[in-house]
Image: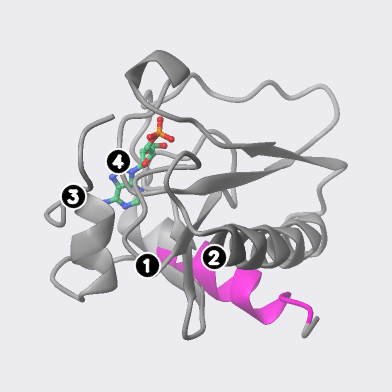
Amino acid sequence: MPDYDPNNIFAKIIRGELPCHKVYEDDRALVFLDIMPRAPGHALVIPKSPARNILDVAPDDLAHVAQIAQRVAKAGMRAFEADGVTVQQFNENAGGQVVFHLHVHVIPRKDGVPMKPAASYKEKPEVLAEQAKKLAAAMPSV
Ligand code: AMP
């Protein structure tokens, strides 16, 4: 497996070198909206530590990301009046990974509404800003 690339897009977001529509942040994790959402409220949960994917992340950081993903899933259910949530995580090219900093997709879902194909639609920044606020407000404390 290649080494972690500190110049990947999500590393730049963590360092504040690129913008994001932030939903949640603590000392070990960051949550922001996917700019090409597969459904409204599609969020990405990432560790702040430099992990390429599930194959090299420290188990404690993975556990923290999973805990935050659960809170984001609950928030997505509330904020987007969802009927369910799809949680996805890809590893290496063969596993469907495109950005090589570990991330967990949390996607609110409505009954009978299929997800848009990956990378098929870039959402307007003003819509993402509004949705990030809504999701942040719905985050449970634990
Ligand atoms: P994957 O590595 O296959 O899980 O896909 C990477 C995901 O990151 C895709 O869903 C992209 O839409 C998303 N993405 C790429 N660049 C950005 C960005 N600057 N901000 C938010 N999401 C992004």
Q: Quadrant of residue 62?
A: bottom right
| Circles 2 and 1: CB atoms closer than 8 Å | yes
Residue at numbered disc 4: 100
Q: Which residues are magenta?
A: 129-140
Kindly identify the amino acid type of the residue bearing the numbered disc 3. Asn
Label 2 to label 1: alpha-carbon separation: 8 Å
Left-right relation of 109 to 84: left
- What is the CA distance from the residue labelled 1 to the residue labelled 3? 13 Å
Q: Earlier in the sequence, mark 1 or mark 3?
A: 3
Mark 2 CB lies closer than 8 A to ligand 1 = no
Indicate yes or no: mark 4 CB to ligand 1 under 8 Å.
Answer: yes
The mark nearer the N terminus, 1 or 4, is 1
Which secondary structure, mark 1?
loop
> Which amino acid is tagged 2?
Asp
Circle 4: element type: loop
Q: Secondary structure at mark 3?
A: loop
Q: Are marks 4 and 2 in contact (CB under 8 Å)?
A: no
Q: Label for residue 49?
A: 1
Q: Where does label 3 land, which residue?
A: 8
Number of numbered callouts drawn: 4
Q: Position of residue 3 (x, y in %)?
A: 20, 42
Tell me which amino acid carries mark 1.
Answer: Ser
The relative height of residue 51 versus residue 131 in the rendered view (above or below) is: above
Q: Indicate which disc residue 67 carries.
A: none
Question: Which secondary structure is most common in the magenta stretch?
Answer: helix
> Dot 4, how many residues are within 10 Å of its Cα: few (below 14), some (14-19), or many (20+)?
many
Q: Type of residue at label 4?
A: Phe
Is 106 positioned to the left or the right of 55 in the image?
right
